[in-house]
Every structure is written in structure tokens, then in C-alpha cells.
Image: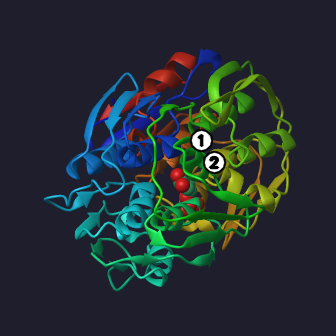
Amino acid sequence: MLSHSNIRFHARSGGALKGRLRVPGDKSISHRSIMLGSLAEGTTHVSGFLEGEDSLATLNAFRQMGVNIEGPENGRVVICGVGMHGLKAPQTPLDLGNSGTSMRLLSGLLAGQGLDLTLTGDASLSSRPMRRVTEPLRLMGARVDTTDAGTAPLHIRPVPSLKAIDYELPVASAQVKSCVLLAGLYADGVTCVTESAPTRDHTERMLQGFGYALQRDGSRVCLKGGGKLIACDIDVPADISSAAFFLVGASIAPGSDLTLEHVGMNPTRDGIINILRLMGADIEVSNERSVGGEPVADLRVRHAPLKGIRIPEDQVPLAIDEFPALFVAAACAEGETVLTGAEELRVKESDRIQVMADGLQTLGVDARPTPDGMIIQGGQIHGGEVDSHGDHRIAMSFAMAALRSDGDIHIRDCANVNTSFPAFDRIAGDAGLKLEVEHG
Ligand code: S3P
């Protein structure tokens, strides 16, 4: 476990990724399992739960609101649901750490509960835009205050009722969509959300799994407030966003042959596979099946020469968390890779366009940031020291870059790898990455 606040990665150059492994559980699904399980009638059993800091922040928040939750123990969690109106006001502000999903989804879920509470987070989360959720909630009659800058802490005040809205998402964001739908559970009338581009639909799938009726019509989804959730069992697939580092690592490292088991293959999340294949990656999908309403499969990935591409904009929301890893793939590809239409990357756990461009340039790669993307010329990655800016996905992406660099890569500020991928160092090391974790 990477628990120290000042952790550095030392990734030695070279190596290959081999064998079979299962990365930890899907973060988005883990969050939602706690949220819906807590509001359900009956007991929900979860397996494959991600025991990372982000999903644990959600779990602890519901404990603070009076929900009895056992575990997690080896990915197993048992949630004794309190019903739609059983949450209690917490004694202290709910600290959601680094987790944007916790904050944005909870703001909607809690807006109509009649509770008075505050949501806080770490420095990164406290600088991320929150008006994208407070604005639709205000239209529903909620009172959720931000700072003057539109950031956390969020103060949720009790209101007598919420009213349904018909909302067109101004940004392609599953967090905003989910926030409005979760508030809609408590609203009078039918709440509808229309998205400009498909974003992950785990909230919709899981609501249906808990027996809540919703109507989907193309890009529009609607639900009627005032219903209830019935407890169910949830088997969380391995997180394709964590698998992404290994898909890229094995693709770029000669001699690699790696199988990733039980990976979530939801079509709103599979952009990484589509984009890597367009670049020439050798990814074989097998054993396709469905668990609890979510498709999963095993992925075998072997080294292949990659070529630069213009990344199709329709793939951007389907791979939104995978661009740090994809930039590393582009740095190893032959020719130019161009990403556009990805301005959302600037407001993730860090400004992923700037931080990745800075790091790649430090390692000798011609990476030019643009307002909404990046232009990367493939070439040789050199050794050097880069800063992850506390961004878990950037730390893991640069660790994988060492598979193809001609010198070691040192990465600063890696403790937040624990938010999404505890034991990354062990799992990646077992597969063949030469990674040392340095404390202090
Ligand atoms: C998430 C949605 C995405 C993603 C995040 C998880 C979710 O955020 O980047 O890691 O679980 O709904 P946006 O909705 O801001 O795109």
C-alpha cells in the first residue's frame, strides 16, 4: 500500500509485461454501489469493490450518515440499506479527499434529503469546477452553495422539495448527468437529462439493477421521482481505466504478452481499446460475458509497433480518463498524434494537458499542448525526473513510459496512486515493470 504523503516512483528503463493479472475494481461502479446500496431497502452485497481512497471516501461518507456498512474485506462489502429517506445528518463535514465523483454525485443525491451538510475535499478537488452541478441543482430548487470561485466546500441546505427538470448537459460529463438523475429520485415529476455525447452510463444501469424504472431514448434519459430502490448483489468488474496503463505498457514494450482478466467493457468506456487499435495495437478480446448488467471480457495484449493518428473526437468522452496513458503511447508511436476536443482534461485531478506535456518535454518528447488537446511527435523517450502533480493517472502513465525510455524515470508526488489503484507497484512489478517506491 502506498500510504505516505511524499512518495516517489523510480521506474527503471526497459523490461516487458507478461503473464495474467486482474486490476482492481472499477472506481465508478464502486462509488455507485455504496450510494445506491445505502439508499436501498434491504442488504446489498458487493464483490470486487475498489479499496482505493476515492471509493473509501464515499463509503466513509455514508457511514457518517448512519449507514451500517461491513468491510471492505478482499473486495467484499455488505451495505445495510436505510431506504430513500433514512440518511442522518453527519456530525462533521464530509471529507471526500481527491474524489470528484464522490462530490458531484453526492451533491445531487443529498440535495433533496432535507439535511444540512458540507462537502469538502483536498486541494485538487477544492480547485475543480462545481457550478456544473450546483447550477442544475439550483434549477431544481436545491440550495447548494459554492465558494465565490464556484468550488468546494459545498454547503447543502435543506429545502422543502425539489422539482423535476429537463436538462441538456452543457459538458459531456457522467458526473453531472448522474448528479441530476440522483437528485431526480427526490424530485416531484419526471427528470430528464440529454447529453451531447455518450458518457459512462453506470448510474443508469445500476438504477435499473436496483429496480428503479428509467426511460432511455437515444441521448435522453428520464426518471420519475418518488420511487424506491431494492437491494441487489453487485459484482464489480476490473477497472478498464486501470487496465489502460497495462494496455499501453504491453503495447509499447517489445516482448510483452499480457492478459488482463475480467475487465469492464461497457461501450461508454471502451475508447482506449478503439484508439489503441487505430494506432495499430494488438488487443484480443475473449471470454465476453455480462456480470450484473455490465459487460466484461479478458484482454490479451501483445507488443506491436504503433503509429500516430488523429484521435476521433467521438472517442474522447469514451476514453476521458485514459489520455495520460494514451499520450505515452503516442510518444512511442511512429509519426504524429493529434488530440482535439478534449478541453475537459484541463479540469481533471490536474490539468492533464499541461502536466503531461511538461513531463513528456522533460523526457525529450516533442509534445505541444493546445487549448483542447495535444500534438505529439513519436520518438525516443529519455530518462529524467517528472512531476505528477499529485495526479494518480499521470504517475502511473509515466511509470509505464519507462518500459521504452533509454534512461530511468523518476516521478514525484505519487501517493495519490492509492486513490484508484492500491498495490499498483506490486501488480505492475509482478508483470515486469521495474518499479521502486521511494518514501520521504
Ligand atoms: C466519472 C466520470 C468522469 C471521469 C471520472 C469518473 C464517473 O468525469 O473522468 O473519473 O464516475 O461518473 P466527468 O463526468 O467529469 O467527465
Q: Amino acid at mark 1?
A: Ser
Mark 2 residue type: Glu
Q: Is residue 388 above or below residue 406?
A: below
Q: For the residue labelled by badge 1, is the local secondary structure a helix, a strand or a loop?
A: helix
> As drawn, is 270 to the left or to the right of 22?
right
- Numbered mark located on residue 241 in the image: 1
The answer to whether one can see residue 265 in this image is: yes
Q: Position of residue 227 (x, y in %)?
A: 48, 57
Label 2: which secondary element: loop
The residue nearer to you, when weighing 324 against 206, is 206
Q: What percent of the width, then of the height, locates residue 403? A: 63, 30
Query: Residue at (44%, 22%) from the top-left corner?
Result: 426
Circle 2 crowding by C-alpha within 10 Å: few under 14, some 14–19, many from 20: many
Instruction: Indicate which disc, 1 or 2, sits on the residue closer to the N terminus.
Output: 1
Residue sitting at the far left: 91
Residue 16: tell me if it is visible.
Answer: no
Asked where in the image residue 195 lies, by quadrant, the reply is bottom right
